[in-house]
Image (cartoon, grey):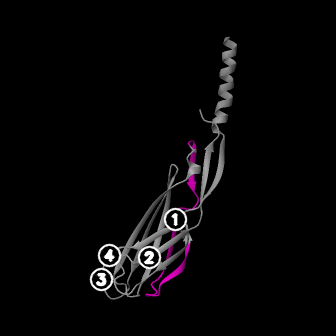
Amino acid sequence: MQKLIQRTLLLIHIVLPTASRAQSNIALQVPLPDAVIYADQLTKGDGDVYGLGDWSANFTLTIDSHVLVVRGSMIFTEKANDHTTIVGNFEQRIEVEALKNCRFCAAELVENTGFVQGPNVGARGYRWYSGKGLVKNAYIMTDTFGTDVGLIGGVVRFAPVSIRLFCALAML
């Protein structure tokens, strides 16, 4: 009996550390829904950008267990007159069903930032702008006639997100 126990312990000592180190690398593509973001907070000036200046929107992506968190901010700045500045923020939580069963996995985002920017083209309606990183493109209104607070901004489209999963195949 004692020899059987010794052999079993030796087998456990040799096999289990090897099995517990076995890992699998998995790549997962996740589409993100569009973000609707408007500059709705006046921080400086009279609220009218007068078709002058620039704008930008920046986004970051984090992962929390099986939830992707998208955070964004947008800013419109006027280059003349009273230097009106209008900002807006965005946050969305997206549950990823495929990650719910990954209890023994470490997740890493391949790309976790993106932005889109451009000039203020005046009150000429919505226009398409190309993005960088996570941001595929955006359909943005940069100015209206009169006060712009809450009326300038639009829809931002994202590129699919790549997630690398490092999963243990055998855990103790």
Up the image or down, 98 lies above or below 72; here it is: above
**From mark 2 to mark 3, how far is it between C-alphas?**
18 Å
Viewer-nearest of labels 2 and 1?
2
Give the amino acid type for the residue marked by disc 3 in the picture: Asp
Q: Which residue is mark 4?
A: 42
Viewer-side residue, 124 vs 54: 124
Mark 4 vs 1, N-terminal side: 4
The crowd level at tag 4 (other Cα within 10 Å; few <14, some 14-19, many 20+) is some
Viewer-nearest of labels 4 and 2?
2
48 vs 91, left or right, is left
Viewer-nearest of labels 1 and 3?
3
Give the amino acid type for the residue marked by disc 4 in the picture: Leu
Secondary structure at numbered mark 2: strand
Secondary structure at numbered mark 4: strand
Q: Position of residue 93 (x, y in %)?
A: 47, 57
Mark 2 vs 1, N-terminal side: 1
Pointer 4 with pointer 3, Cβ within 8 A: no
Secondary structure at numbered mark 1: strand
Q: Main secondary structure of the magenta part?
A: strand
Q: Which residue is mark 3?
A: 46
Give the amino acid type for the residue marked by disc 2 in the picture: Gly
Pointer 1 with pointer 3, Cβ within 8 A: no
* Residue 49 falls within the magenta-colored stretch: no
Mark 4 vs 2, N-terminal side: 4
**From mark 2 to mark 1, how far is it between C-alphas?**
19 Å
Q: Which residue is mark 1?
A: 113
Secondary structure at numbered mark 3: loop
Which region is colored magenta?
103-131
Q: Which residue is mark 2?
A: 153
